């Protein structure tokens, strides 16, 4: 973790924004896979990490904004625990690393909350995403699990989002480290993939690199010959010459900052002419979006620019037609690009998504309901300190083709006869990570192959 003063300063800034009341931070618990002692890999709540700085299960904390104090609630290990875990730092030692000097046993949390309720004090909570934390809010505050998200403090959410969205120098350095490891993962995949391998072989190799760097994966690996399925975690297929392979994978550092890159490459040594045509359309959209990045630029406008650029390229290949401005405005391009151009990135690969996309990416403004753009997670103007992805793609989804043609949708913009010759094409995505500086945006991490020729140079070794 970072130095204790980092967490003290963060809590001080949070207190200045919110004024009065109490802030309840619930850390995560161990989560069983199939019985209590066989747990999933533990991952602490990111907001708890950000403000409290403790990466252990079973913790909670309360900030008293009126008293200017922070109290951590956790239990020291018993001898029975130590048999299984070994000796770990005490509660007091861990709290001190986050600049917290006041600690109480876990059981005392209910008493403190009850006293606050009895005194008519305001208790601010964040929306829970773990079922055990929904139950804790029910026991502590009487908030029914079904109403837990609605009961969350909007004031608290907005304050956390605005702080976590602006990455400091320590965070950017850790993010850079995560992206460097992520580049290593992708380079290894591009160099090793061969016909006859399983997708699982490549998924295993990139996972090994993430773990060997001392951290973990930032999300389950997407390693697939079916790139048209946007979040495809099936690794059972065998690679064959002539196919495309899409890898979407990222590393997480020991401090839990994340990387997120996507590359698409031929299973053979070179793209087919048709594959290269589509790859170049995606790359052109990617480069156009990157060139448009700047402080103050609404990311929604960058997304629409990428959509318009994709549509131009697709029209050049005979897949789209007609008035492209109207096509993008009405959402016809979503036949090929169904998702958003990017998302915030930090302690979460989709940063702060548990707090609500409408606050993270839209500053409280409503999202579009139009297919395609409704999946855009980030729309707000870019600010110095923002870290985010840029990831245009083209995806040929047979089920979507069938439905839209049967419904007669967008016949003025989509050349369906030409489109259906791409029915088994798959998908292509290019994704990189960026940070906004005071005057410009820059790419995070070391270089990696981007153009079709650069990709083929790796594939040809």
Image (cartoon, rainbow, N blue to C red):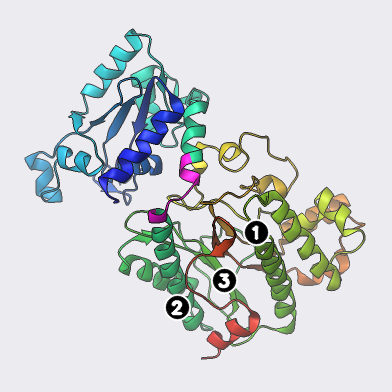
Residue at 63 percent of width and 85 percent of height: 453
Inter-mark Cα distance, 1 to 3: 21 Å
Relative depth, front residue between 61 and 269: 61
Say whether residue 273 is left or right of residue 88. Answer: right
Residue matched to label 1: 293
Say whether residue 378 is left or right of residue 274. Answer: left
> Can residue 268 be seen from the camera position used here?
no
Residue matched to label 3: 263
Residue 69 appears at what percent x and percent y? 28, 26
Q: Quadrant of residue 360?
A: top right
Residue at 72 percent of width and 71 percent of height: 284
Residue 421 appears at what percent x and percent y? 80, 72
Secondary structure category for the residue under label 3? strand
Looking at the image, the residue that sits furthest to the left is 79
Residue at 59 percent of width and 77 percent of height: 265
Magenta region: which residues?
A: 163-170
Q: Is residue 458 above or below residue 116?
A: below
Q: Quadrant of residue 311?
A: bottom right
Say whether residue 81 is left or right of residue 99. Answer: left
Q: Which mark is residue 188?
A: 2
- Is the residue under label 2 in contact with that under label 1 (CB below 8 Å)? no
Q: Nearer the N terminus, badge 1 or badge 3?
A: 3
Q: Nearer the viewer, mark 1 or mark 2?
A: 1
Inter-mark Cα distance, 2 to 3: 12 Å
Residue 413 appears at what percent x and percent y? 89, 59
Inter-mark Cα distance, 1 to 2: 29 Å
Secondary structure category for the residue under label 2? helix
């Amino acid at each position: 973790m970072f130095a204790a003063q980092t967490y003290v300063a963060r809590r001080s800034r949070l207190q200045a924004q919110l004024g009065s009341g109490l802030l309840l931070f619930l850390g995560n618990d161990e989560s069983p896979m199939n019985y209590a002692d066989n747990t999933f890999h533990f991952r602490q709540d990111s907001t708890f990490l950000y403000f409290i700085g403790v990466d252990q299960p079973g913790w909670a904390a309360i900030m008293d904004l009126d008293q200017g104090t922070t109290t951590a609630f956790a239990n020291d290990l018993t001898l029975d625990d130590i048999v299984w875990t070994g000796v770990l730092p005490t509660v007091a030692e861990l709290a001190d690393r986050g600049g917290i000097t006041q600690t109480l046993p876990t059981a005392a949390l209910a008493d403190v909350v009850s006293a606050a309720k009895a005194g008519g004090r305001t208790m601010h909570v964040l929306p829970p995403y773990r079922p055990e934390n929904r139950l804790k809010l029910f026991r502590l505050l009487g908030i029914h699990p079904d109403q837990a998200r609605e009961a969350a403090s909007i004031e608290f959410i907005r304050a956390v989002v605005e702080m976590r969205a602006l990455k400091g120098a320590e965070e950017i350095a850790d993010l850079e480290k995560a992206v460097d490891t992520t580049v290593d993962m992708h380079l290894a995949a591009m160099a090793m993939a061969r016909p006859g391998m399983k997708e699982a072989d490549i998924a295993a190799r990139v996972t090994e690199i993430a773990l060997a760097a001392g951290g973990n994966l930032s999300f389950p690996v997407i390693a697939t010959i079916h790139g048209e399925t946007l979040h495809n975690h099936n690794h059972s297929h065998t690679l064959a010459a002539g196919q495309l392979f899409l890898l979407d994978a990222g590393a997480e550092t020991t401090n839990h900052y994340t990387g997120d890159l996507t590359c698409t490459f031929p299973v053979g040594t070179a793209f087919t002419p048709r594959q290269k045509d589509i790859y170049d359309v995606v790359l052109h959209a990617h480069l156009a979006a990157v060139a448009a990045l700047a402080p103050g630029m609404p990311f929604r406008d960058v997304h629409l620019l990428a959509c318009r650029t994709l549509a131009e390229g697709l029209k050049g290949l005979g897949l789209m037609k007609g008035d492209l401005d109207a096509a993008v405005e009405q959402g016809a391009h979503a036949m090929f690009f169904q998702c958003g151009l990017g998302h915030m990135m930090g302690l979460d690969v989709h940063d702060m998504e548990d707090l609500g996309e409408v606050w993270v990416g839209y500053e409280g403004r409503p999202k579009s309901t139009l297919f395609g753009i409704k999946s855009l997670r980030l729309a707000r103007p870019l600010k110095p300190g923002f870290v985010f992805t840029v990831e245009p793609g083209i995806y040929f989804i047979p089920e979507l083709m069938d439905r839209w043609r049967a419904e007669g949708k967008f016949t003025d913009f989509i050349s369906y006869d030409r489109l259906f010759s791409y029915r088994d094409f798959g998908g292509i995505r290019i994704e990189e990570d960026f940070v906004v500086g005071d005057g410009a945006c820059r790419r995070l991490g070391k270089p990696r192959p981007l153009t079709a020729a650069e990709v083929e140079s790796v594939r040809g070794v």
